[in-house]
Image (cartoon, grey):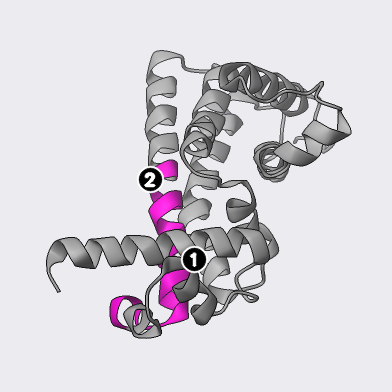
Amino acid sequence: MNETNVRSTQGKILDAAEQLFARQGIEATSLRQITSEAGVNLAAVNYHFNSKDTLVKLVYLRRVRPMNAMRLERLRQAEEAKPGDLDAVLEAYYGPVLDLAEVVNIGLFLGRLYTEPHGVACEVLAEEMGETARRFAQALGRILPHLSAREIFLRLNFSAGVIAHTIGGREKLGWMSQGLADMGDKQQLLREMKQYANAGLMAPGLEQRT
């Protein structure tokens, strides 16, 4: 099998697994379903990925790792160009996710990282999201000295929920609002998300600082 064919087969399997994981979850998706969706035989999965756990990890890494790398790069640029600017930090946090959402349907897909008890998903979450969360928490701590470290992490988690719920529930929001809440304009959506998160992050802290 030449290199081009190898990459083509791997890509088909990864794409199929991503779609199935998003629609029905990791545990509920079998290797046979993945091979059927991808149009390859079962031996191809074992040949290219060895196991379902390896496949799960690579499915997430190919999306999450470059997304977080872009987040951290934009955060670095924001802190150099606009130190102390909360809006710039939020743009670095939300922007790359919305950029990726334009290319692939990642709403439910990323949501599985937080809702599925699958061991590999938890591993990816800890390894790939943990460092990103800590870097943004440090940036927010410098901008929001009135908040404790605990409050910073909690509010960052709440802010993460904004985008996870938004990109994962586009269709639901459409029919609930009867088309009023149109999320077709990415830049407008980004502005509204930043405004909402900004208000929550800037709110007075509930813990007494000493």
Q: Is residue 44 left or right of residue 88?
A: left
Residue drawn at 43 percent across, 42 percent down: 67
Q: Residues within 10 Å of mark 2 (few under 14, many from 20)?
A: few
- Residue type at mark 1: give it: Ala
In magenta segment, residue 62 = yes
Q: Is residue 160 left or right of residue 60?
A: right
Q: Say which quadrant the N terminus sits in.
A: bottom left
In magenta segment, residue 187 = no
Report the front residue among 83 and 7: 7
Residue drawn at 50 percent across, 60 percent down: 18
Region in magenta: 47-67
- Residue type at mark 2: give it: Pro
Vertical relation: 108 (above or below) 7: above
Q: CA distance from mark 2 to mark 1?
A: 19 Å
Report the front residue among 143 and 78: 78
| Residue 158 visible in image | no
User: Which label was assigned to residue 208?
Assistant: none
Residue drawn at 43 percent across, 22 percent down: 79
Q: Is residue 198 left or right of residue 56?
A: right
Vertical relation: 11 (above or below) 153: below
Q: Which residue is mark 1?
A: 17
Q: Residues within 10 Å of mark 1 (few under 14, many from 20)?
A: many
Vertical relation: 95 (above or below) 59: above
Q: Measured from the top left, where is residue 65 in percent x and y?
A: 40, 50
Q: Measured from the top left, where is residue 59 in percent x and y?
A: 44, 62
Q: Which residue is mark 2?
A: 66
Residue drawn at 65 percent across, 22 percent down: 189
Indicate which disc, 2 or 1, sits on the residue closer to the N terminus. Answer: 1
Label 1 element class: helix
Q: Measured from the top left, where is residue 111 in percent x and y?
A: 65, 53
